[in-house]
Image (tube, grey):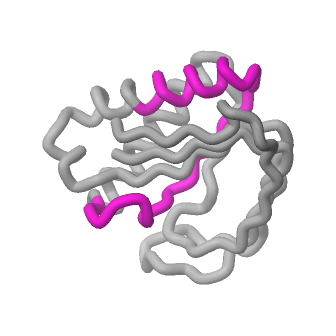
Amino acid sequence: MKVLVMYVDEFSYSPAVKNLETADEVTSGEKFTDSILAFIQVEKSDEEFDIKSREKKLVNHLKWTARKNDCQKIILHSFAHLSESKASAEYTKELFTLAEARLQNGGFTTAQTPFGYFLDLSLKAPGHSLARIWASL
């Protein structure tokens, strides 16, 4: 799993193109402020592990990043461009659902961008050292 995490002052998206036939219909976007935005690429090799172990590893990384940025809001964004390897859509979506539930149980406010869409994105991110963190989990 590859993860690029950014602290964002502002982030918004709107759906542009549906690229997964089974995805829910989404017609409007959302806006967020003062959040952790996680671009997440779940890889085929992740499917060799118990999904709970991958969820725990992802959540621990996101919690650490949020603490470093004194932030309680986390946005999960499936971003299949950090690696050539891709897990199945089903595995990825389940991992996101489990991670979001664990984060909420930990007191975080969470959101997911629409799964199965290319999105128009707008973001404003500060230029300090822990505002952008890349990891291979």
Residue 11 vertical position relative to residue 133 in the rendered view, above or below: below
Q: Nearer the viewer, residue 11 or 115?
A: 11
Looking at the image, residue 40 lies above or below residue 25: above
Question: Where is the C terminus found, in terms of image quarters?
Answer: top left
Numbered circles on residues, count: 0
Residue 99: x %, y % from top left: 47, 34
- Residue at screen point 75% across, 25% down: 71
Q: Is residue 130 visible?
A: yes
Give the answer, above or below, for where 96 lies relative to 117: above
Asked whether, in this view, residue 78 is left or right of residue 136, the answer is: right
Q: Residue at x 50, y 69 (%)?
A: 116
Above or below for 120 versus 75: below
Locate residue 123, reporting x and y percent. 78, 57
* Residue that sits furthest to the left in the current view: 48
State which region is magenta.
58-86
Q: Residue at x 72, y 25 (%)?
A: 69
- The x and y percentages for residue 105 are 58, 19
Q: Is residue 73 magenta?
A: yes
Residue 110 visible in the picture = no
On the rendered structure, is 61 left or right of 137?
right
Which quadrant of the rendered structure holds the N terminus? top left
